[in-house]
Amino acid sequence: MSHGTRSSRPLAILVYAVAVYLFFLAVLGYAAGFFASRGVPKGIDQGPHAAVPAAVAVDLLLLLSFAVQHTVMARPWFKRRWTRIVPKPAERATFVLAASLLLALLFWAWRPIRGTVWSLSGPGADVVWAVYVAGLIAVVGSTFLVSHFDLFGLRQAWLHARRVTYSPPPFVERGPYGHIRHPLMAAFLVVFWATPTMTAGHLLLAAASTGYILVGIAFEEHDLVHGLGDAYTAYRARVPALIPRRRRV
């Protein structure tokens, strides 16, 4: 019995990782419609309204919950303790599951806030929508420039199922990573801010998310310097974080 349980565990972890990945894809697809307030049952500017102080409090609490989960569960000290409970090959998939659940909660519980900061129509709106779609494409594309399936926990489970020892993907400076250090985060900023109609609620999400991204980059780079040493220190000195430098002719 115990031998059979042990031999089936890698398959169970792989099935779990695949199920989490499919759930994440569904949440990501909903997110694209949520930020645009199009094609989904409830967008960022749709749903029941509450008094502004209450709506701001609820929305900030939802954003804070996601930020805390994302920041704490990504730290090496938490991973070392967490993997005493969760199998190491399932750790990343569990991180993705927690993040996806909190995003789904945010979409469900988000309270729109009235007030329009700017509103574009006609060709101007079309241009902004094109930028928004480009941002979405860049978000997905950036994950493949590193290791998409490692980032979302599938590679770890797959290697475990094949009885292959896991090793993190090597750091490779290519494509957008030769111009900015965090193309994924830059793409997210485009998605948050590129809207032809910026409401007060959308502005709250965009501003809070921008602040979190800047803080998150600081935490991530601390870990990268610790893990990669001089190679990443030199890379950080040479390549800007989010905004490309003008190349000298």
Image: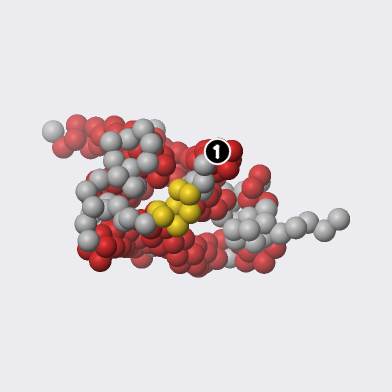
Looking at the image, the residue that sits furthest to the right is: 249
Identity of the residue drawn at 25% across and 60% down: 55
Would you place residue 214 above or below residue 140 in this image? below
* The quadrant where residue 15 appears: top left
List x then y, in percent, for residue 113.
Answer: 31, 56
Q: Which residue is mark 1?
A: 122
* The quadrant where residue 62 appears: bottom left
Identity of the residue drawn at 64% across and 47% down: 176
Identity of the residue drawn at 25% across and 66% down: 53
Q: Quadrant of the N terminus?
A: top left
Q: Tell me if mark 1 has few (under 14), some (14-19) or many (20+) residues whose alpha carbon lies within 10 angstroms of its own.
A: few
Please count the marks in the image.
Answer: 1
* Residue sitting nearer the eye, 32 or 176: 32
- At label 1, the amino acid type is Gly
* Residue sitting nearer the eye, 239 or 185: 185
Can residue 190 be seen at all in this image of the molecule?
Answer: yes
- Colour scheme of this structure image? secondary structure
List x then y, in percent, for residue 198.
Answer: 44, 52
* The quadrant where residue 149 appears: top left
Can residue 17 be seen at all in this image of the molecule?
Answer: no
Q: Quadrant of the C terminus?
A: bottom right
1 sits left or right of 49 in the view: left
